[in-house]
Structures are given as structure tokens and as C-alpha cells.
Amino acid sequence: MSIPYLEIEARGSHREIGRQIGEAARELIVAGIAYYEEHHEDMGGPSFAAAQRECLAYLPFARQALPGVVAELEGMAEGAGVALARLLVPNLGEELTCNSDPAAEPPTRLPRFAHNEHCTSVAVRAGGRCLLGHNEDWWAGDVDKNILLRLTTDDGTGILAMTSACLLPPTGINSHGIATGGNTLYARDQRLGVPNNFIRRHLLESRSLADARERALLPTRARGSNHIFVDAAGALLDIETSAASAAFIAGDDRLVHTNHFVDPAMTGCDLSTSAGTRRRRVRALDLLDQGLARGDEPGELLRTILRDHDGVAEAMSICGHPDLSVPLGERDMTTASMIWDVRAGSVEVCAGPPCENERRLFTLR
């Protein structure tokens, strides 16, 4: 079984890149927005009409801090022939459906799905290789709308990324030897500011880990996230953020992160109630340590970890499958799986759960 996905090459300014993506993925973008419109309240957000209005309050912060990223999304909207406000809703998915501060202004919702399962990230340095593996777990309706992006910005930065068609790419590898993955976190201090997916897109153009760190700590960020990085020199770095705080976790030869805060300085603001996120992190660390002790080839070790089920319910495993007993709008799953090799400048990707979908190899030119 192999879930298909669209391959898109785009180059130029941010707006030109966005327009090319929008034109090439028009049908998938329209279908993706329709899915969010139908199910947004099931996802834990407001009605889609209310969500469009809420998104506009975040836009001035994004325009001021990250005008290029906003221009890219505007280009996508133009290319796909959709209103920008409608495309903003899926790109503020965490702000709208993982919202976590009831005291904020304007009043926001408690995180209805703070128990949900989302992404797993695993970084390893072994055998002369430095790899980052990531299972992108998000809403099940996105699994058939993936696109593989090969981007070249005005300054010549090359990017390889897989994402849902109506989303700015949140993870990937670039020609500066940086790969990054992200994990949803639930903190107490969400506020109006720059949406997290805009920051993640911004991270894809990082020129070094120091540059990535500065980008991740954007002072006007709206909410927290986990950002995990590897670089071609072999460094591993994890940054946990809330809207106003941050902690740094340096890796020696391995790093694992899921969807709860790990650093003691950050655990006090954690609102995650998921048992699965803690189970997945322990399981991934155990498999990683066992494989490193055996001297396993690091690429195959990451493949094994990312397709693992560990005999638990598939909806809570590292390789996530949808729980068919819940309404469609509430289902999440592994929508894509990626392994980035920063020294080779390559990524292995598949759409859907990696236990049953074929990986393909793409390289930066």
C-alpha cells in the first residue's frame, strides 16, 4: 500500500513560491479547507466562520515579524483561488484547536484535545551519520492531501519538506545542513502573537543552529512548541518553548521528543493530559538505546522506531492509526513519516503510517 502525494517544485520570492504551490495544489487546498470547514468544531475549535475572524487578530503580529512567510501564504491563497482568511484557519490549527489559556484576552478555550496523540521526533548521531526522524501526527483528513515540496528561495536556500497541501511546511531539511521537526505542546500562556506554524516555516531557512535558536525564540510568538534540530556537523538540539519561556536540551548522541514538556524548568506550565505522549517517548528512547547498544545501522533503527506499535492501541503508538470509533473530525493519525539525513542532504518520506506505506528517497540538488 502506498498513499500518493503531489510533488511540487517552486522557486523565487516567498510570494512567488506560494503562488506556484497554490496553483499546483489548488484542488488539494480547496479540499483541505472544506475538510476543516466541515469538522472544525469537532476538532475542538470554534465554528469555521468564527475561526476566520479569530485568525485576523494574529495576522498583524505575523506581518510585522515574518512578512515573507505571510507573503508566501498570500501567494498560496492567490494561486489556489481562495480567500486568505479561509487558508489561515488550518495554518492556525494549534492556536485554534490546542488553545490553552482561558484568562487570555480575548477569552480562549481550554485545550479540549490536550489528551490527543500528535508527533514523535527522534534524532541520532551514529556510524558517521546524523539523522532526524519524525512522524507527523495530525488530523486524519489530511492524510490524502500531502505534498512534497522542493523549494528554492531568492537567496538560493534549498528546502525539502512534506506537508498537508493547505499548510505552510512545518518540518524539513535545507541546503545549509539543517533539519528540523516540531511537536505540539500545551502550555498555560498562549496569547495573541505570531502563529506557531509561521515560525516553523521560518525555521526552514535557518543557516545554523544559532540562527535556528534565534528564530525559534521569536519574542512575539503566540504559543509554545517543541523544536528539534540536527545539523551536518553532528550537533543535536531541542528547544522547548511556551509563549514566554524556553528551555534547551542538548543531545549527545540521541534526542527524543513527543507532546509534553520534558525540561524541569518547563513542566510546571504543561497542560498535556495524554498518557500516549509519555508512553511514546519512553518507548522510542528504549528502542533507540537498544539499537545503539547493538550497533544498528542508524537509518534502519529510525525506520524501526517510527513504524513501532509496541502491542498498544494503534491510536496511541509511535506509528499512529485513526480510532474509527470516534467521529471523523476528532481522529488523528500519522499523516506522514520522514527521515532526514543532513550530511547526505536527503529525506525518506511516506504519506500515512510508515508500517504500511512505502518510503521514497529525495535529495537536495
Image (tube, helix red, strand yellow):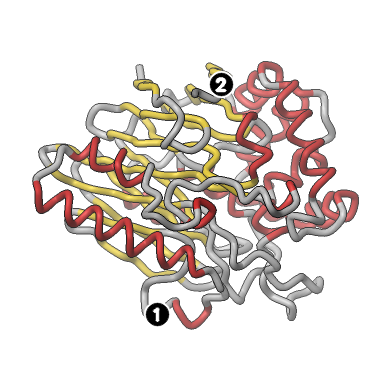
Q: Nearer the viewer, residue 288 or 251?
A: 288
Question: With respect to residue 265, does 148 lie above or below?
Answer: above
Q: Residue furthest right?
A: 49
On residue 152, which mark appears? none
**Residue at 57% across, 68% down:** 186
Name the residue beneath numbered marker 2: 4
Q: Is residue 189 left or right of residue 80?
A: left
Question: Looking at the picture, which amino acid does disc 1 mark?
Answer: Ala
Q: What is the quadrant of residue 26 in the picture? A: top right
Q: Is residue 240 left or right of residue 108?
A: left
Name the residue beneath numbered marker 1: 265
Give how far across and how far down residue 67 sits, in percent. 64, 42
Q: Secondary structure at mark 1?
A: loop
Question: Looking at the picture, which amino acid does disc 2 mark?
Answer: Pro
Distance from label 2 to label 1 (Cα)?
Answer: 42 Å
Give how far across and how far down residue 276 sits, in percent. 48, 64
Q: Quadrant of the C terminus?
A: top left
Count of numbered tags: 2
Q: Is residue 67 visible?
A: yes
Q: Nearer the viewer, residue 224 or 134?
A: 134
Task: Give neighbour class at mark 2: few <14, some 14-19, many 20+ (Cα, 10 Å).
Answer: some
Q: Is residue 329 left or right of residue 162?
A: right
Task: Give neighbour class at mark 1: few <14, some 14-19, many 20+ (Cα, 10 Å).
Answer: few
Q: Secondary structure at mark 2?
A: loop
Q: What is the quadrant of residue 356 in the picture? A: top left
Q: Nearer the viewer, residue 48 or 79?
A: 48
Q: Earlier in the sequence, mark 2 or mark 1?
A: 2
